[in-house]
Image (spheres, rainbow, N blue to C red):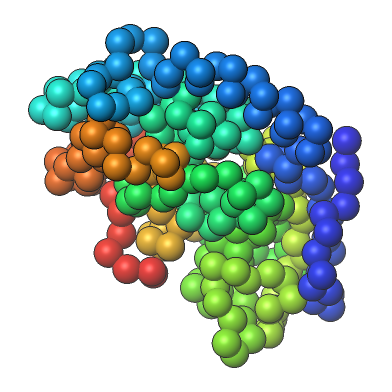
Amino acid sequence: MATELHNDAEPAAGFSLRRRRRRWVIPAIVAVVIAIAAVIVVSVKGSSNATVAGSHFGKNMKVAYEADSNSELAFLQYLNTKIAPKYGVQITPVGISDGNQLDLATANGQYAANIYQHQYWLKEVLAKTHWPLSKVAPVFQWAYSMYSEKFKSINALPNGASIALLNDPANTAQALWLLDRAGKITFKPGTTPWYATTSNIASNPHNYHFVFIDYGDGPRVLPDVDAVIAYNMQFIGAGISQKDKIYAPPAPRAFAGQLVVGTKYLHDPQVRKLIKVFVDPRVQSYLRTTHNPQLKDQLMPVSSGNN
């Protein structure tokens, strides 16, 4: 059901805003139920196989990813086949559609790690839940682009074009930063790009109207707006032609996907091995050169700077 997002900042003049609830924000009572269930599950340890001496985990380690992301699954399968054997561990990918469940289960040690979020999404989660989670390292970049069925380039968008943005603060900021870097809007002096909202826009010379959509809705709303800014993997997964991708700048390092682990397991010997798998130099080289259709143009190597 649609509901208004609470935001203390006033929308910039001339913007049309339609906001809906972030899908990962859940009522406190549901969080409590999940927490109780998670505690029961993790009481039998964080892996189905025998644990390694001195560790909460066994050799076979569960790593959670967003269930809808075939690219994240393919990435974990590559790691398990090509990298993990060197470090004496196995990776079992676990697809979870509820980000709250995924993060809470990671904090409690049901999963050894997860890979579904950038640092600013995680910051929003921790501000609301205070779960003991820690980001360890950036491991890939999600390709983040502008798509349109009506126009062939970002420069072809007309005055007053309607542009759909993901409605959580972190991904809204990422989309606005894309437009700022393209020279289509400008931010007010002193704006931190990865925290930007529409209230931080100093100029909007093309009078763009922003429509806010739920995560994953980009392909569905594409026919109804002039353009959508979202993750490539969502459009590729929905079978949208890549001819509809009209602007694709390099992803900022600030929004790199993070390896996240439960804080109390940071020094667990098996987790330390798992971390070595993700930061192995071969991983970035593979992302740079792969032709795997489940990964190409979806997960990219981590960029060298914020821009």
Nearer-the-camera pick, 48 or 86: 48
Image quadrant of residue 179? bottom right
Number of numbered callouts drawn:
0
Nearer-the-camera pick, 166 or 130: 130
Nearer-the-camera pick, 123 or 4: 123
Q: Give the left or right position of residue 171, taking residue 203 as reference.
A: left
Residue located at (84% from left, 78% from top)? 13
Image quadrant of residue 287? top left
Query: Residue 253, relative to residue 238: is it above or below?
Result: below
Query: Residue 254, relative to residue 105: is it above or below?
Result: below
Please provide percent x and percent y for residue 69: 49, 30
The N terminus: image quadrant: top right
Please provide percent x and percent y for residue 95: 50, 23
The C terminus: image quadrant: bottom left
Query: Residue 203, relative to residue 114: is it above or below?
Result: below
- Viewer can see residue 233: no
Query: Residue 247, relative to residue 273: is it above or below?
Result: below
Image quadrant of residue 114? top left
Residue located at (19% from left, 27% from top)? 84
Q: Give the left or right position of residue 31, taking residue 64 as reference.
A: right
Residue located at (41% from left, 58% from top)? 251
Nearer-the-camera pick, 52 or 283: 52
Please provide percent x and percent y for residue 149: 63, 45
Residue located at (43% from left, 62% from top)? 254
Q: Give the left or right position of residue 292, taking residue 72 as reference.
A: left
Q: Residue furthest front?
A: 54
Q: Residue furthest left?
A: 86
Q: Residue furthest top?
A: 49
Please provide percent x and percent y for residue 111: 44, 27
- Viewer can see residue 75: yes
